[in-house]
Amino acid sequence: MLIIAGAGTGKTTTLVHRVAHLIASGIDPGEILLLTFTRRAAAEMIRRVEQLLAVAAKSPGIARIHGRHVVGGTFHAIATRHLREFGQYLGLDAEFTILDRSDAEDLMNQLRSELDITRQEKRFPLKGTCVEIYSRCVNTRQPLSLVLKETFPWCVEHEAGLKALFQLFTQRKEEQRILDYDDLLLFWLALLQDSPAAPLLRQRYKAVLVDEYQDTNALQGEIVRALRPDGQGLTVVGDDAQSIYSFRAATIENILRFDQEYPGTNVLTLSQNYRSSPEILAASNLVMSLATEGRKKQLWTNRPPQGKPLLVNCRDDNEQSTLVAERILELREMGVSLKGQAVLFRASHHSATLEIELSRRNIPFIKFGGLKFVEAAHVKDAMAMLRLAENPRDIVSALRVLLLLPGIGPKTARQLTERLGTGSSAFEPWREHTPAAATKIHWPVFVALLRTLVKGGQTTTPLPLQLAQVRQFLAPLLEQKYDHAPARLRDLEQLEIIAARYESRSQFLAELTLDPPTSTQDFAQDPLLDEDWITLSTIHSAKGLEWDAVYVLHAADGNIPADMATRNPREIEEERRLFYVALTRAKTHLQVYHPQRYYFHGKNQSDRHSYSQRTRFLPDDILTAWQIVTPRIQEPASQTHIANGLTTADVRKKIGRMWE
Ligand SMILES: Nc1ncnc2c1ncn2[C@@H]1O[C@H](COP(=O)(O)OP(=O)(O)OP(=O)(O)O)[C@@H](O)[C@H]1O
């Protein structure tokens, strides 16, 4: 059975009921396998199944459960479980250990140096990219040459080196009895296809149910087929309009071709949306109606009308942040809790300015997806340069920046910190230092920059410009040191924009260190905040969730769709689906923001900017579904430097809070 369930049509409810129904009609829970996208989803569904059955068990004629549980989890978790139990059929030690992603990267790095590839081949891909390429080959089931050509064209020339590296990687994992994430799936498939355990495993399950099928990859598709070769007892649920994980090798083909692959499939389409107001649904349907592929479906709803969603044309990122923060508070006044509200964006750094604005207004928030902005290593590197200039006795920052330079190890770094002077001539002794060959080109530039910065702390150079100088200096070093350097450099540009709001360097450093915007990258725990908080999330991490009010930021071309994902029509279609996922998270209030200007530097530093285009996914002819607003915030003198000091209103508010 293939259940095509549109956004908000009760996919979870449907799966839960189907599992409960199977059990109620006599299948042993231990014979049911439920594969989900996250561990949390599996646990939540099983809890709901058990709740339903507890109610149903009171009715006569319902089968009793004999203490066994539904087997549920992610593909990786179930693979691990089966391999521990049956791995010996493949000669696998039951005690194998699992490499997580960063361990795999470290191993790859070690082997890169062992093979000495980097010396022979300049600009050989970094460890993270090597793991990405390897993983993509495994998960798409495509040969290295094709993966390189299609997804990593800048690495094509390194095919031979990568092949040798991957061979050694595989061999080393075998010697050390370790499996990485991809191996778990590969070994599970081998177990199901070629081992004597295959029939045992197939017979074990009478029913296999797969959630979020649109985000499975080719390898997972093969595993599902190996589990139920003829499709008997197989149920998959998904929404092709919400397939958003192709960067992790997911393929929408799995769901689009399902009924061809399994002839006789019973296809059900759920199209009643229980989540969103009719106006939100109409606006989202229109966005999807322009998609070029996929199963066309029109969702409908019985929910009462609420008014059109808003498309807000704002001046720039700052105005966007102010407006969103104000609207959040307004809605809270109207009774929508903070937990019922979420701000969604395409890339993690898109919320940087808003994070500061929310902190300033004491609006608690939690962030899902991406790194905590000020904790990202490269942001810390840039901040460390400024911190050292601000306080040359800050050895932690000194060591951090010295170790960024090639040719400087911990010992030299420590010796250099001992030679630091104080005040504005603090870096003079470093001019006398004779750097090692590898450090030679960087050293004079580095010392000169610090000498400028140490003086810039007073008044001369505007803070964003100081950060721009730091960014230019760091650019080549970041490329050597980290993966995804272009994205990191954009983060540093973002930092310049944030910095423009502060009056002095010391104030900027203090505020961002003492009271960094609270954010987190996983769902593991609730934040230690007030009992109510707003959610900030990348759209990817918002998958499957819903809120009363949703704000979508930066609906400008280049951000949505992201400029890095517009290389071909398939990528653009995926970005369209991503936008659709964002819109369909909203129940009652939906606001999409389009900042019209993007400054090259901080606004206070120079007025150089470019004008943005509204996202291409909202062309003029579907704007009828939106109410377009163009607010203009008054910018009185006191607000220009709003983060620079307390206004009397702030002081009053603070004093007022003492008595709350
Ligand atoms: N039969 C139903 N009657 C009333 N409300 C329902 C029903 N089924 C689901 N809902 C409600 O509709 C909302 C959406 O359900 P659910 O989250 O299961 O949708 P979904 O299909 O998984 O959505 P998406 O794919 O967009 O994440 C939830 O608030 C859920 O409680």
Image (tube, helix red, strand yellow):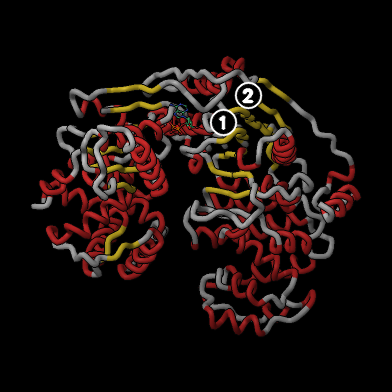
> Rounded to the nearest whole Å, what is the CA distance between mark 2 and mark 1?
10 Å
Total residue callouts? 2
In front here: 147 or 439? 147
Q: Position of residue 142 (x, y in %)?
A: 26, 43
Quadrant assignment for the N terminus: top left
State left or right for residue 223 relative to residue 426. Answer: left
* Residue 435 image point, x, y percent: 57, 78
Residue position marked by numbered label 2 in the rendering: 309
Q: Are marks 2 and 1 in contact (CB under 8 Å)?
A: yes
Q: Is residue 564 left or right of residue 642?
A: left
Q: Quadrant of residue 119?
A: bottom left
Residue 534: numbered disc? none
Residue plotted at (69% across, 75% down): 394
- Marking on residue 586: 1
Disc 1 marks a residue whose amino acid type is: Ala
Q: Pinpoint residue 30: horizontal percent, then vertical percent.
A: 23, 46
- Element carrying mark 1: strand
The secondary element bearing badge 2 is classed as loop
